[in-house]
Image: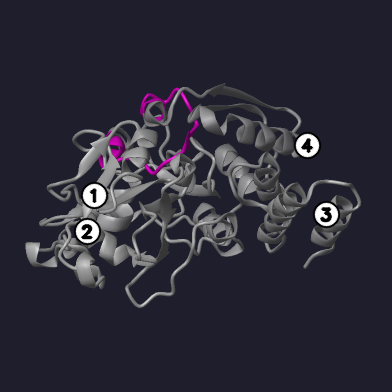
Amino acid sequence: MSLRSRAMKISLASFPFRGALLAASVVLLTAGAQAADGLPDYQPRMNVTGVLRSCGNPQMAALLQRWQAGFKHFHPDVQFTDDLKSSASGMYNLDMRTADFALMGRAIFPYERYGVYERSWVYPAELEVATGSAEALHKSPALAILVHDSNPLAHLSVRELDRIFGAERGGGWNALTWDASVARTPKDDVRTWGQLGLTGEWASRPIHVYGAAGLGAGAITFFQTRVFGGAETWNEDLREYADRGQMLADLAKDPLGLAYAPIAYAGPGVKALALGETPAGPFVSLNRESVAARTYPLHRPVYVYYTRDNANTELTPTLGDPRVKEFLRYIVSQQGQHDVAAEGSYLPLTTAAARAQLQKLDSTEIPPEHRFMEN
């Protein structure tokens, strides 16, 4: 443990906080410090001046303000203008060149790539800048898999979720590419509890599946991407809810129900299952530690998107505005990830994830979709 982490623990312990508050604070601060301590300090590569324009998710406003304040310590002459209306507006502003980068609480949908792609033949650049929350609503929370309290099941896998919630399909969307490798047939469907290993009176009982209302044609949700491989076909008996609080209230009355939702919507009468990648496990419970470590399979990243072309639709030598990339290097640095921990709802990137994002920023390799057009 770093000296910074130990100092945080000593400082917290010296005050008469209640036990639960002390424990929660220690988890927040030490997890944030440990995530960032393996990262390099931010060292400016250039002097950034002028105005950087942001757009996108308003839920990330407090986090963005921390990043901006930290960056201005190194670049006092930089200015920021923010237009944070929604994640849905983020890509439109990049398309129209009215923003330099977009904060997104979700990955962009396939069709949101078209505007930038059609002008430059490259997708918008995607950078993970934090991990979504474990519980906080509207902060890209992890998804829990929930059943009635009386259900004897203890865990499921992502592979089994696909077989339960999904249906026959010819493939799924990977960006703007149709991926036939995730195709499957009806024989892969799981529709009864017995198919998940439950016995006795449970064996022949049907699984009642509950989920969020569809977002419309072309909108591939995180659940579809992570569980279905980007496919659009659902279990034919899916019970869709716009109100997820009501959905879980109904689940509490249905012993045969199975739902996915942020854990904050859960009330009495339901329980969350541990999750693994495959039926062989290992299985991980949803909590702040497992989401921060990204060992819980349905954790959610949050993103910044930016464009790689100039006003003439030509790829820049640095594959993006160097001023934007300098700001993003700060965000993914030790200082920027400590800012995430201090914000309190979002979680810092793991060291491995953050280093991977820094490598993306430094890369000048031509994106594969552009090379395809050249051929």
**Magenta span of residues:** 92-114
Report if residue 370 is visible in the image: no
The disc, 4 or 3, on the residue closer to the chain's N-terminal end is 3
Instruction: Describe the element under mark 3 as helix, strand or loop.
Output: helix
Residue 209, disc = 1
Amino acid identity at mark 2: Ile
Residue underneath mark 4: 73
Q: Which amino acid does the dot numbered 3 rest on?
A: Met
Real-space Cα separation, disc 1 to disc 3, in angstroms = 44 Å
Splitting the image into 4 quarters, where does residue 262 fall? top left
Q: Where residue 8 appears, x then y in whole percent?
A: 83, 54
- Residues at marks 4 and 3 touching, judged by CB atoms closer than 8 Å: no
The reply to whether discs 4 and 2 touch (Cβ–Cβ < 8 Å) is no
Residue type at mark 4 is His
- For the residues labelled 1 and 4, the Cα–Cα distance comes to 51 Å
Q: CA distance from mark 4 to mark 2?
A: 51 Å
Mark sitting earlier along the chain (1/4): 4
* Disc 2 target residue: 164
Q: In front: mark 1 or mark 4?
A: 1
Looking at the image, tell me whether mark 2 or mark 3 is earlier in sequence order.
Answer: 3
SS category of the residue bearing label 4: helix
Image vertical order of residue 83 relative to residue 75, above or below: above
Residue under pointer 3:
8
Q: How far apart, in angstroms, are the residues tagged by discs 2 and 3?
A: 44 Å
Question: Badge 1: how crowded within 10 Å, few (<14), some, or many (20+)?
Answer: many
**Labels 4, 2: front one:** 2
Percent coordinates x, y for residue 66 in the rendering = 69, 35
SS state under label 1: strand
Badge 2 vs badge 3, beta-carbon distance below 8 Å: no
Q: Assess whether mark 2 and mark 1 are in contact (beta carbons under 8 angstroms).
A: yes
Identify the image quadrant of the C terminus: bottom left
Q: Nearer the viewer, residue 369 or 351?
A: 351
